[in-house]
Image: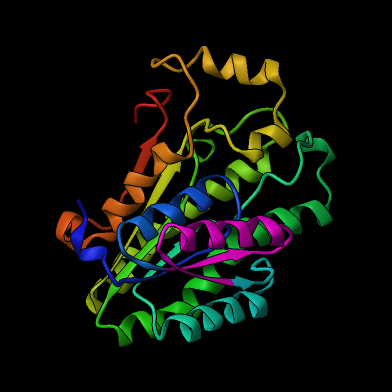
């Protein structure tokens, strides 16, 4: 469907599990050359690479903690070295870290959540821009969240606010990088069944969320993939920039 993605060089941060892993597989199936990134989940990231290669796809592995600016730059540099350049950057790394009531947030948690969800996006983008310019343009796709619009669930104030930042900085990126033929957009997943919710949400919380979704079910990681492919494809979305695509089963209709 997205034939112009064949041969494109794509880095997906946070692609060892969940949505990122599904996106990596989706780009590989479209013929792109992908770099899978992981940090704590090295075994899982390597499994994604091997699965892609097993299907005849082109995948490389780069490890590093993108919550640290220097390491985020090293991840981008490693991807560029592996691919010979860069056409698409997908800033997908992020996590809630843990649920904590607002009045119990301390500086350490603040730094951890903001570094992982915000600093990583800024640092990786800064490192990628020279390579996207050298390629004659490209696409940046950031992973936002429904939490960035509705404030998130109990104990998710920092995560939700960080994702609101991601959505808004995407709009600024779109303005700043448009003269260089670089488009910047975001995908905002709703409640998707991934290790994220296995770790941070109880069965009762998930059922409560499900009842607010008009489609009556939670989403699957694979159901997010098409939005990333669409936003990366210049033939499909070449006149789209600064947008946030909501993928949430109708839970939020902005």
For the point 64% across and 68% down, the residue is 66
For residue 161, which quarter of the picture? top right
Magenta stretch bounds: 34-61
Q: How is the image coloured?
A: rainbow
For the point 56% across and 73% down, the residue is 123
> On the picture, is 60 further left or further right than 34?
right
Foreground residue among 49 and 39: 49
For residue 34, which quarter of the picture? bottom left
For the point 50% across and 78% down, the residue is 79
Instruction: Judge whether 238 appears above or below 8 on screen.
Output: above
For the point 47% across and 72% down, the residue is 125
Percent position of residue 169, x then y: 44, 59
Instruction: Judge whether 169 appears above or below 252 on screen.
Output: below
Percent position of residue 38, x then y: 64, 63
- Is residue 43 shown in magenta? yes
Foreground residue among 76 and 15: 15
- Is residue 116 shown in magenta? no
Foreground residue among 218 and 242: 218
Foreground residue among 145 and 249: 249
> On the picture, is 249 further left or further right than 47?
left
For residue 254, which quarter of the picture? top left
């Amino acid at each position: 469907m997205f034939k112009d993605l064949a041969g494109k060089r794509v880095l997906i941060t946070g692609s060892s599990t969940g949505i990122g892993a599904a996106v990596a597989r989706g780009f590989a199936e479209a013929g792109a050359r992908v770099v899978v990134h992981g940090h704590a989940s090295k075994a899982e990231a390597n499994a994604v690479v091997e699965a892609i290669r097993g299907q005849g796809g082109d995948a490389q592995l780069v490890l590093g903690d993108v919550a640290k600016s220097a390491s985020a730059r090293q991840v981008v540099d490693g991807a560029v070295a592996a691919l010979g350049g860069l056409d698409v950057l997908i800033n997908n790394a992020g996590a809630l870290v843990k649920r904590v009531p607002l009045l119990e947030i301390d500086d350490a948690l603040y730094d951890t959540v903001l570094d992982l969800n915000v600093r990583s996006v800024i640092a990786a983008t800064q490192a990628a821009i020279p390579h996207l310019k050298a390629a004659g343009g490209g696409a940046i796709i950031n992973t936002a969240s429904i939490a960035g619009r509705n404030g998130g669930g109990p104990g998710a104030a920092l995560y939700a606010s960080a994702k609101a930042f991601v959505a808004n900085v995407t709009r600024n990126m779109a303005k700043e990088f448009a003269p260089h033929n670089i488009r910047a957009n975001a995908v905002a997943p709703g409640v998707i069944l991934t290790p994220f919710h296995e770790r941070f949400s109880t069965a009762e919380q998930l059922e409560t969320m499900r009842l607010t979704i008009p489609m009556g079910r939670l989403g699957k990681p694979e159901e997010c993939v098409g939005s990333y492919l669409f936003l990366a494809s210049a033939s499909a979305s070449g006149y789209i920039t600064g947008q946030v695509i909501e993928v949430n089963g109708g839970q939020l209709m902005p």
